[in-house]
Amino acid sequence: MLTGEESENMHDVIVVGGGPTGFVTALGLAQAGVEVLLLEAGDQIIDSPRAAVYHWSLLDGLERLGIREKAEQTGVVKDDYSWLIKRTGEMIRYRLDVLDEVTAFNYNINLGQDKLAQIAKGRLEQLPNARLRFNARLERLEQDSDGVTVWLDNGEELRARWVVGADGAGSTVREQAGQTFDGFTWPERFVATNVYHDFASGGYGLSTMVVDEQWGAVIVIIQPDGLWRCTYMEDASLPEESYLERLPAAYEHLLPGDGGYRLHQASPYKMHQRCASSFRTGRVMLAGDSAHVTNPTGGFGLTTGLFDAYALWPTLAAVVLEGADESLLDIWAQERRDIFLEKTSPMAIHYKDFLFHCFRGDQAKLDAAVAGMRRMQNEPAYCRERLMFTKGLETTSPAER
Ligand SMILES: Cc1cc2nc3c(=O)[nH]c(=O)nc-3n(C[C@H](O)[C@H](O)[C@H](O)COP(=O)(O)OP(=O)(O)OC[C@H]3O[C@@H](n4cnc5c(N)ncnc54)[C@H](O)[C@@H]3O)c2cc1C
């Protein structure tokens, strides 16, 4: 691992952003032999409560990167889903073991996205061709036919042949590349909380989706020591600064079973459905939240971001190391954008409407959705078919076909 003080030459790739997308992309590139510099604006990996579920379909990609086992040891492996229809008290359950015949990894891993980023960082730090800088905020970039010049907020100038913007929803790279971020912002606010509470005593499974127009929630265990994520929604017109004062009243409805609770962390956030106009602008690619954002219901946001990374790193590595045709990057960019617009975003909107709004009074739609869940519980083949949705968010690298 080179140190931050060493002299700068032309980097093969600068990855901007030390979130899970940035670290996974950088790790894939570096392990393939590409020289990589990762820039992160903060002084450490952000550890506020954010994405926490790695669907089964993502685990092959973690395995390929050599970090699946560590992720499993750090987080919670779980293969059950429960859906509580709060109004009737009906609990519907199904398991991921119906996926036995399609994958060796028929379970999800739950762990905070900061932990996944830390695991990737740990491996990256062992590689001589990878370099990592915190407190390094990209402010501006310009590209020419040979590469990209990047300026940090301290005035420092860096050069790279390629830049990957993995700098999140407010991406400076996206803005500097001249791409728009079209879509809309939801009128509700989500509140992501990490809490110690005995949800199992209330009959909840390790992932429980609570369907209710007022107290809908996503409740999943995220640490072996009994830390759970409980995400609920509130009206965004309520003042954000006082969300913690409202939390105890919300928990009265959200926390079942015995005993008290210990709040560990909480984070309110605005939700959007937005997508960049293009994921490639010459030598600059966008991946993860810098390319697309969605409401988190279903956990498809980071799933799509990691699939961006899984398909990008082999493609860019082939271009950098083997002189593969750069047009492969256009194919990558178009395919990933299509996946977000045609699959990720519509399904996340559907699940938000189901869980948190019960389809806004459309009883026939609600009945059909609940009937679908019951079918998943009772019919393994149908359950498998529905669970394949997250596999469909994957695209392979165009360089590997
Ligand atoms: C409170 C909250 C809860 C969420 N809950 C869920 C959930 O339950 N399920 C789900 O699927 N998704 C959830 N999301 C969304 C999920 O967190 C994102 O999809 C995920 O963070 C995307 O990862 P990323 O690496 O692309 O971007 P980020 O995690 O946003 O990482 C971007 C990184 O880039 C850095 N950066 C920004 N600008 C610059 C710059 N100019 N120069 C250098 N570095 C820069 C930032 O400091 C940050 O570390 C949640 C989001 C929030 C905010």
Image: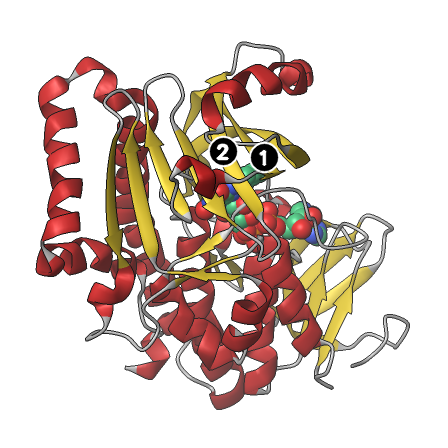
Q: Nearer the viewer, residue 51 or 224?
A: 224
Q: What whole-number distance in Å separates the C-alpha atoms at marks 2 and 1?
A: 6 Å
Q: Tell me where residue 175 appears, x and y as whole percent.
A: 57, 42
Q: Is residue 321 or residue 168 the one in the foreground?
A: 168
Which residue was labeled with disc 2?
231
Quarter of the image with the C terminus in it = bottom left
Residue type at mark 2 is Thr
Name the residue rendered at 31%, 68% in the picture.
Answer: 106
Q: Is residue 196 left or right of residue 394?
A: right
Q: Position of residue 129 (x, y in %)?
A: 70, 84
On the image, the x and y values in percent for residue 190 come to 50, 27
The residue under label 1 is which amino acid type?
Thr
Specify which label sits upstream in the sequence, 2 or 1. 1
Q: Position of residue 25 (x, y in %)?
A: 55, 68
Name the residue carrying label 1. 193
Q: In the visual, does 239 lie left or right of 340?
A: right
Tell me if label 2 and label 1 are in contact, CB under 8 Å. yes
Can residue 182 be seen here? Answer: no
* SS state under label 1: strand
Neighbours of disc 2 within 10 Å: few (<14), some (14-19), many (20+) = many
For residue 136, side relative to residue 169 (left or right): right
Label 1 Cα neighbours within 10 Å, binned few <14 / some 14-19 / many ≥20: many
Residue 364, relative to residue 12: is it above or below? above
Q: Is mark 2 within 8 Å of ligand 1?
A: yes
Residue occupying image coordinates x 30% and y 25%: 86
Quarter that holds the N terminus: bottom right
Relative to 283, residue 346 above or below: above
- Disc 1, ligand 1: is the CB inside 8 Å? no
118 up-or-down from 211: above or below: below
Q: Residue at x 39, y 79 (%)?
A: 325
